[in-house]
Amino acid sequence: MKVPITRPFFDDDDRAAVAAPLDTGWVVQGPNVAAFEGLFAQHTGAAHAVACTSCTTGLHMALVAADIGPGDEVLVPAFTWVATANVVLYVGATPVLCDVDLDTFNVDVDDLARRITPRTKAMIPVHLFGLPADMARLNALAADHDLKVIEDAACGLDARIDGQHVGTFGDFGAFSFHPRKAITTGEGGMVTTADAGRDALLRALRDHGAAKSDLARHGDKQAFLLSAFELMGFNYRMTDFQGALGVTQMKKAPWIHERRTALAQRYDRLLADLDWLRTPAAPAGWTHGYQAYVCLFAPEEPTFDRLDALRDRRNALMSALEADGVQTRQGTHAVHTLALYRDRFDLTAADYPNAALAENLSMALPLFPTMTEAEQDWVVERLKAHGPG
Ligand SMILES: Cc1ncc(COP(=O)(O)O)c(C=O)c1O
């Protein structure tokens, strides 16, 4: 049996939705993108939602809208997808990496607090794999030090703290619709904000700086006159094919989250007797989005001096699973060990020991809404058969 790490879910509604713009002829940022934004805002409880081409471009626009630039420092977890740090470089600011907590894979708030300087202007907490970051503590620090908060909610769809959706705690939230995420539009992103002025700014930034969108202009008199352009923007417009797919995917989001949660809880039960594998958990009252089911391989206490030996054992297990047709993946990467960051900021793996351990000891198991119990049983059976080595 072959069990992939993920399998995006598409049905006939998705297929019809993607084809429809071919008939209307409106294929870029039109009525379907607007409809997707409306559904997304409603689902998350965000006052405003602005679609764009990816979470990366959404984070970039949020930093521009927050007026972050050269000379500014931005706090970023060291264990995250490289885009979270890259966007800080895009605006000429300095990403200041912070270590993470191995129990949650999210930023270690104490470590982050120690790295605040007079130049710190913002933080980008990440809700990694769908587990919310500790927004109460992070927002309190931000208030004390007058920092902007840009939530990297790439993995955060349906992640909530006491019912409040992630992406609505900070100044901005940025979501991803890449195929590894719960719902997908191929590539795609969404930025949320509570502020009408920021919403208007984001809408201009994604469209070359235009004060009025093409859709609005076409509905007006004198549509032949182009918009005013008051600031430097980008072309981060989502296509209407993607918007249409976003609408039909959004309608399935509650079912997708329900399926992912049921499967994750079934993993929790089936893996409870393995003392060498730490499974993901959310505090009481928090809702895990389960973008991924990422475990920590820990047959011994995961300390930095054991990193190489434990990594070799984890990799041997992942290779054995691969040979059995079970796809696993490391959770994400330790940004400070990537050549760009290591060399530019003169970093070593030991500078962020937990991030290094997380990269080398994390293991994502297959999780997707159409996964059958037989597929899941196969994953668990092979994991138990091989053991920690
Ligand atoms: C934590 C995190 N941030 C940002 C991104 C970038 O998202 P996108 O591919 O939509 O640009 C990802 C994507 O995997 C991610 O996992």
Image (cartoon, rainbow, N blue to C red):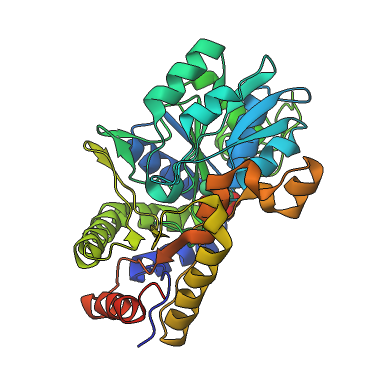
Indicate whether 114 appears above or below 16. Answer: above
Image coords of residue 151 (percent x, y): 50, 34
Indicate left or right for 146 with 318 as reference. Answer: right
Q: Which residue does the image show at 39% across and 65% down from the upper left?
A: 14
Indicate left or right for 247 with 84 as reference. Answer: left
Q: Is residue 365 visible?
A: yes
The quadrant holding residue 312 is bottom right
Q: Which residue does the image show at 42% across and 84% down from the upper left?
A: 325
Image quadrant containing the N terminus = bottom left
Q: Which residue does the image show at 33% across and 45% down from the upper left?
A: 158
Indicate whether 203 appears above or below 4. Answer: above
The quadrant holding residue 211 is top right
Image quadrant containing the C terminus = bottom left
Q: Is residue 26 visible?
A: no
Indicate left or right for 353 with 339 as reference. Answer: left
Image coords of residue 278 (percent x, y): 34, 57
Front residue of 334 and 325? 334
Image coords of residue 368 (percent x, y): 34, 66
Count of numbered tags? 0
Q: Which residue does the image show at 35% across and 71% down from the upper left?
A: 12
Image coords of residue 141 (percent x, y): 48, 18
The quadrant holding residue 265 is bottom left
Front residue of 147 and 362? 362
